[in-house]
Amino acid sequence: MEKIVLEAKKREVIGKKVKTLRREGKIPAVMYGHKFNALPIELDAHSTTQALRKISESTIVNISLDGKEHAALIRDRQIDFIKGNILHLDFQVVSLTEKIRTNVRIELVGEAPAVEEFNALVVSGLTEVEVEALPQDLPEGISVDVSVLDEIGKAIYVKDLPAIDKVEILTDPEELIAITSAVKEESIEEPTEELAVEEGNEPEVIERGKREEGSEEE
């Protein structure tokens, strides 16, 4: 993957005043981690949003600060879910010579034969797993081929994930990744005449008819 470099500046503005930064097209952020004291920084909103659009939390980004690059992982993103803007970012500075633990996303690929043959539904379980590796060896994601799901009730577990060189998966091997389930068809039945009587509809009509007959006799 292409190297991602984010240009950053030390941030003097903190607290509620960061709203001013956002109006100026900046994203407030913080860096912390391996032999690195927590430091408030600011980033260009447009270029940062474009760079981070498709990366995961297991992707290494390089933050250029005062002429020096720091390898880091995104640990938290605060998003304005109405406008879709990034409000704040947390970066964990990492050492490229020491293993770290992080989560890697699971991506289901392919087609499950049970869907077409048995009208089954593929139900996903975990969407990510915890792994340990050197930062540069972390996979962006793990693809899981669901074409092995050829029967209803067939499942894929963490223990079935493909081995990844230099990466140890820490999540419980028995955790579910995906399973095929039968689809239940629900039908809506028309109310029967007996049900209508129980609901009090028919007796009301009969009683009204009797009153009308009585009034005619008068």
Image (tube, rainbow, N blue to C red):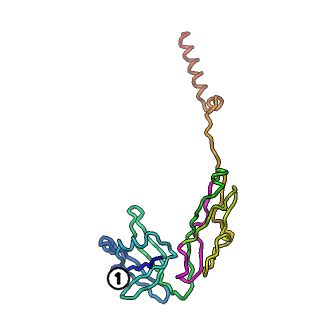
Asked whether the viewer can see residue 16, the reply is: no
Residue displayed at 66% across by 72% down? 172
Residue displayed at 57% across by 23% down? 205
Q: Dot 1 lies on which element?
A: strand
Magenta stretch holds residue 16: no
Q: Position of residue 86 (x, y in %)?
A: 40, 69
| Left or right of residue 81, residue 202 in this image | right
Q: Position of residue 160 (x, y in %)?
A: 67, 69
Q: Residues within 10 Å of mark 1 (few under 14, many from 20)?
A: some
Q: Specify the quadrant of the image occupied by residue 212.
A: top right
The residue sitting at the top extreme is: 217
| Left or right of residue 54, residue 154 in this image | right
Return the residue nearer the eye: 45 or 205.
45
Residue displayed at 60% across by 79% down? 167
Residue displayed at 65% across by 56% down? 113
| Left or right of residue 215, residue 31 in this image | left
Which amino acid type is marked by label 1? Answer: Lys
Magenta stretch holds residue 125: yes
* Residue bearing the label numbered 1: 9
Q: Position of residue 124 (x, y in %)?
A: 61, 61
The segment highlighted magenta reads 121-140
Q: Position of residue 83 (x, y in %)?
A: 38, 62
> Which quarter of the figure is the C terminus placed in?
top right
